[in-house]
Amino acid sequence: MQFSGYYTRTPENWPVIGPLEQHPDLYTIAALSGYGTMTTCAAGELLAQWMMDEPRPDYAGHFHPGRYENPVIMAEISSIKSDDQL
């Protein structure tokens, strides 16, 4: 018997959480890879803050789908010497 699956992940292995800029009424929690069960509560809380337009923590932009267009965030992520693989 064999069990296998796919882990969706970003190159830096950080989840994507927040509104989709192309469709302002759509939100995502994606690419949880191996962290799924450990991060779902925090990811859900962060997404709810986006959806309700509530104050968000300073790090919220690091998980936003648009982070790849933000050179400051990407330089910060690129400077980390680990891909956070479990």
Image (cartoon, helix red, strand yellow):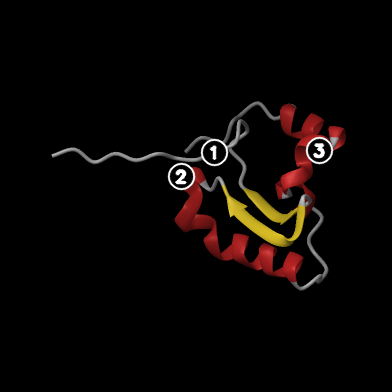
Q: CA distance from mark 1 to mark 2?
A: 9 Å
Specify the quadrant of the image occupied by residue 9: top right
**In percent of the image, x 47 and y 38: which residue is there?**
86
Q: Secondary structure at mark 3?
A: helix
Circles 1 and 2, Cβ within 8 Å, touching? The answer is yes
N-terminal of the two: label 1 or label 2?
1
Which residue occupies 61% across, 46% down? Answer: 15
Q: Residue at x 82, y 55 (%)?
A: 58
- Front of the two marks 3 and 1: 1
Looking at the rendering, in which quadrant would you find the N terminus? top left
Determine the CA span between mark 3 and mark 1.
Answer: 18 Å
| Disc 2 residue type (three-letter) | Gly
Q: Nearer the viewer, residue 72 or 4?
A: 4
Is 76 situated above or below 26? above
Where is mark 2, residue-wise?
Answer: 34
| Residue 43 coordinates in the image, percent (x, y) | 61, 60
Q: Which residue appears at 82% of the width and 36% of the height?
A: 69
* Of pointers 3 and 1, the one earlier in the residue sequence: 1
Q: Amino acid at mark 1?
A: Arg
Q: Nearer the viewer, residue 78 or 44?
A: 44
Say few, some or many: other residues with alpha carbon within 10 Å of mark 3 (under 14 / 14 to 19 / 20 or more).
some
Q: Nearer the viewer, residue 86 or 44?
A: 44
Coordinates of residue 2 in the picture (x, y in percent)? 19, 38
Of the numbered discs in the image, which one, if any, rests on residue 73? Answer: 3
Amino acid carrying label 3: it is Ile
Label 2 close to label 3 by CB (< 8 Å): no
Closer to us: 35 or 24: 24
Q: In the rendered image of this protein, does residue 85 appear above or below residue 34?
A: above
The kind of secondary structure element at disc 1 is: loop
Q: Which mark is residue 9?
A: 1
User: Upstream in the sequence, badge 2 or badge 3?
Assistant: 2
